[in-house]
Image (cartoon, coloured by chain):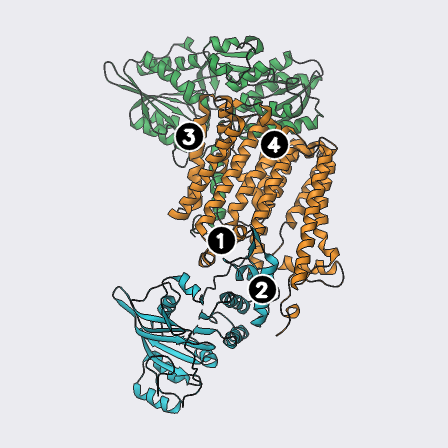
Chain colours: A cyan, B orange, C green
Amino acid sequence: MRTAVSVELPLLECRGVSKCFGAVQALWDVDFSVSRGEVVALVGDNGAGKSTLVKIISGIYQPDSGGFSFDGQPGTIRNPHDAVARGISTVYQDLALCDNLDAVANLFLGREWTRGVRLSKSQMEKRAVELLDSLQIRLPSVHSPVASLSGGQRQSVAVARAVLSETARVVLLDEPTAALGVSQTKMVLDLVRTLREKGHGVVLISHNLAEVVGVADRIVVLRLGRNAAEFRRGASSSAIVAAITGADVAILAEQSELSPQPLNQGGSGGSLD
Amino acid sequence: MRGSATAVTSGRTAHGVLGLGAVGTLRRRIGQGDVGSLPIVVGLAVIWIFFQTQNSNFLTPRNLTDLLLQMTITATVATGIVLVLLLGEIDLSVGSIVGLSSAIIGVLLVSNHVPLWLAVGVALLVALAIGSAQGAIAAYVGVPTFVVTLAGMLGWLGVQLWVLGTTGSLNVDDPAVTFLFTSYLPPALGWLAAIVVMAAYAGERVNSNRQRQRLGLSIEPWHKLLVRPALVGLVILIPVAVLNTWRGVPVAVVTMLLLVGALHLLLTETTFGRHVFAVGGNAEAARRAGISVARIQITIFAICAVLAAIAGFMSVSRSLGASTQTGSGTLLLEAIAAGVIGGTSLFGGRGSVWSAPLGALVMASLANGLDLTGQPPDIKYVVEMVVLLVAVTIDAMTRRSRARSGR
Amino acid sequence: MVGFLGHRAMKLLGPVLVASFAAACSSGAATPSPAATATVGSAAASASAAPTSGPQVTVSILLPDNTTPRYESQDKPAITAALTKYIPNVKVTSYNALGDGAKQLSQAEEALTNGSKVLIVIPQDSNAAAAIVAAAHKDNVPVIAYTRIINNSPLDYFIGKDTLTIGKQEGQWIVDNTNSGDTIAVVNGSPTDQNAKLYNQGYMGILQPLFTSGERKLGGELWTPNWDPTSAQNEMDQLLTKNADNVQAVIGPNDNMAGGVVASLTGKGLAGKVKVTGLDATVAGLQRIMKGTQGMTVAQDIPTMGDRAGKLASMLVAGQTPPADFFQGTQNNGSANVPTIFVNTIIISKQNIQTVIDLGFVTKDQLCQGIPAGTSPC
C-alpha cells in the first residue's frame, strides 16, 4: 500500500524529455512531474541538467523530444508566453525585481491594472495586501522601494509575484535561499510551505540538501542529464548525495533498505504496484 | 490569517499626534536616503538670501520675473533630459536640436513666409524623427546612447548651419512668435490658475483617500491629507502674488509648467510612466516582465527631442531671432546640471520631472545674482561647478545609504 | 539594455568629457562646436581649379570654424579669388578646423606635408596657433595671420582689422550719440578672446575719462563667455535692473550679441530708445539698424582683405620681399612686431546703409528679406 499517493493527475508532467546543444546532450529521456499541493526538489550537481529542465518548463527552450501533459491532458510549451498561460511561473536567482519600485509596483510589473489610461493604484494595493497576507508575508511597508527590504522579504515579494495571477499553478524557484541568512531562509521556506498549503505545485532547485530535505515532498535527482534517483520525504542526505555524485549502487541499495521507499527510475508517483 | 492592518502597514502611518509622525517619517526617509528635493530647496533659499544681501534688487518682483524668463528655456530642455536620465541614459544632442529647430522655424517664417503653425509643425516633426531615430539606433543596434547622441550633437549642428545659410543669423519679430515671452497672464487669471491647481490637487487627494477607505486600505486623516495641497498652494500663490505686483505671471513660464505638469502625470499615473521607472531601475527585470524596453527607450528619446524643439521655438521668441549660436554653448551642460541639481539621479530609476525647473531655477539664480553683483564669468563657472558637484555627491551618498538600509 | 556606455560610472564621465570639449573650444571667438569627428563642413582639403603653366604652387587657407558664416562664405572666396588672380599656377587648398585648435594644427601639418608654400591662417586659438608658425618655419614656409593675430610667435604677417581702433570708433560713436550725464552699459565679448580685450581697451580708452569726470556714467560692465547672444540678453536684463532702466546707450559689442541686447531692451519696451553698438555688419544687424533698434555696426572691407592676402602670398611665392609701404604698420603679438595690413573699416549707421550694398558686402535681396516695403533703402 503506498503512502500519500494522490489520485489526482499531476499539474505538470514531462515524459522522455531530451535536449541537445550541439554536441552536448544536456538532457536525455528525463521524466519529471509535480502535483497540486506538492513541493518537488530538483537536485543535482553542476551540469546535471537542472537549469536546462527549468528553462524547458518555462518555455525558454524547446525539447528535442518528449512530451508534456497538464492535469493529464497532453500539451506543449512553445514559448514563455505559453508557460505563463498554463500557470507556470519561474522565480530566478537574481529575482528580477526593480529596486526603485515598491512592492505593489513590482508585484504588478508588466500587468498593471488601469482604468482607461490611469493606473488603478488603490485596487492594485488592495490585491497586493491580500496576496501578501494570504501568503503570510510581512513587510514593513508596501510603499517603500524594495531595495529597502531584507533579502528574505525581497525573495518573498518575488515569489508572491509568481502567484499573483489567479491562474498560477506551478511555481519554479531557482536557488531561492542561496544568498540568505538563517532567519531569512526560514522566512522563504515557510513561504514555500504556504504555497503548498494553498495548492500550488512548487519546484525547488537547490544545492542546500538540509533545506531540501526539510521541506520537499519528493526529491528528484538528475545526474549527467538523466534521472538518477527519486526520493520521498524522509530520505537520508547521504543517499541523496550518493545519487547526485553517482556513488556505488550497492551503497544506494543498502540505503534504500533503510528508507521506506525504493529507487524510482522514472515516471511519476503512482506507477509501482 | 492576520488582518491587513497589522500584517502589512502602508507607509503613511498615522501616528496619533500631528507633526511627530511626520518628523519621524522624514528622519527615517533621510536615513534611508530618500531625501528627494529637500536639499535643493534649502540650497535655493540660501542662494536667494545671499544674493539679496549683496544686491537688494535681487528679490524684487521685476528681477524675479526676469529670472523666471531666463530659466524657462533651460528648464524645458532639462525636462527632456530628466526623462532620459530616468532611463539611466543620456542625450547629448538636445542643444543641437534646439538650434536646428530654431533655425527651421526662423528660416521658414522669414525666408519662405510659411504660416507659423506649419513652421513650428515642421520643426516638431523633425525633432520627433530625430529623437525616435536616435532612440531606435540605441535600442536595436545597441550603440550606447552617449555615442549616438554625441554624433547627433555634431550632425544636427551641421544641419542647423546649413539651414541658416550664409547669413548666419536672422531676426524674427512676428508677434505671433514673440508673444510667448512678452505676454503675461492678467492678475485675475493668475490667481484663478493657482486656485484651480490647488483645488484639483486637493480634490484628487481627497478622492483617492475616499477610494482607499472604500477598499479598506489605510487612510490619512484630514489634517494630514491637505498638508501637501496647502504647501503646493503656497508655492504657487506666493509667486503669483509677487509676480502680479509687476506684470503678472509670464505666459512662457506657465507654458513650461504645463508641459512639466503633463509629463509628471504621465510618469506617475500611467502604465507607461511606471515602465519608464522600471526600465531605469532594472531593465532586465522589466524585460522579463514583458515590457518592451526598446519601445520605452524610443518613446522617451522622442519626447526629449520634441521638448528640445519646443525650447527652440521658445528661443526664437525670447531672442527675437535665430543664429548659428542658438542652442550652443553651455545649454546642454546646464540642462543636465539642472536635472541633477534638482534631484534626479544620474544612475537611473529615481527622480521627478519637477527637478528640471527646480534645478534650472538654481542655475539661473546663480547667473542672475552674479551678473547683478558684477562678477566675472570665471566666478560664475566655478560656482556652478561647485553646486553641481554638491548635488551629484548628495545623489551618490543617498544612493549608498539606500543600499545600506536595504538588506 | 546596453546603457550608454555599458558602465554606470561612465555616466559621470560623459558630462565631464563633453565639458572638456566645450572648454577646449571656448578659447576662440567663435561658437564652441566640439569636433571629435568631422561632420558637415570642409574638414578635408578642397582644391580649386589650377594651373595654366609651370609647376603648381600650393597655397593653403586654414579656417577656424563654420559657425561664423563669413569665414566660409566671404573670406575664403575673396582670398581664393585673389590667389587665383595673382598666382597663375596656384593650387589652393583649404581646411576647416570646426572649432578645434588641435585639429587646426594637424591640418597645418598636413598642408605643409602636401607642399604648401604659404599658409594663410585664421587661428582658432590665437595662442595655440604659435605651434603652427613653428611648424611652418621648419619648412621655411611663411605664415600670414588673417583677421585674428597669432600671439607669442615669430609670425610673418598679419592682415586684420585694427581691433583697437575699431573699439575706439565704437566708443567714439557712443560719445557722439549721447548727452552729458547719460548712463552707458558695457557688455563685453568673450573673456578668453584677445579681440574682445582689444575692443574693450579701445572703447574704454575713450569712455573711461568721461566716466571719471562724470560726463557719462558707467551703468555696469560684464563679460560674455563664448560671445553668446543669449547670455548677452540675460546680462542686459540684469544691467537694466541695476540701473532701474535708466540706460541711454549700450556697447554691443558685436552684431550677434547686439541682437541679444536689443531683445532684452524690447522686453522692457526700450528698443529704439537706447543706442546699441555692433560690429560685423551681419544682415540681421543691418536690419536692426534699418528698423532703428541698433545704432551702428562696423563693416569690414572683406573683399579688399582677401585681395591683400592674395597679393601678399603671390609676392612670397615669387620669393620677393614685400615693399614696406605694403603695410600700414606693425602689431605686437607678444614677442614680435608683425608687419600688418589694416583692413578698411566703415561705420555703418542708418544714414549710410546704402554703402554696404554699394560696396558689395551684402546684396539688396539679402538685406531686404523680411523687411516691410518702404523701409529705406528697400
The residue indicated by pointer 1 is B279
Tell me: residue A221, above or below residue B87: below
| Foreground label between 4 and 3 | 3
- Mark 1 lies on a secondary structure that is helix
Is residue A54 visible in this depiction of the protein?
yes
Q: Residues within 10 Å of mark 1 (few under 14, many from 20)?
A: many
Residue C186 in the image: x percent, y percent? Answer: 62, 23
Q: In this view, does C156 lie above or below B237?
A: above
Q: Which residue is drawn at 45% across and 28% down?
A: B161
- Secondary structure state at the residue bearing disc 3: loop
Between circles 3 and 2, the one closer to the viewer is 2
Q: Which chain carries label 3?
A: C
Q: Vertically, is C371 above or below B340?
A: above
Q: Nearer the viewer, residue C308 or C127?
A: C308
Same subunit: marks 1 and 2: no
Amino acid under label 2? Arg
Would you name the residue on which mark 3 appears?
C98
Q: How many angstroms separate mark 4 from mark 3 (CA)?
A: 27 Å
Kindly identify which numbered label has been placed on residue B376: 4
- Amino acid carrying label 1: it is Val
C-alpha gap between disc 4 and disc 2: 60 Å
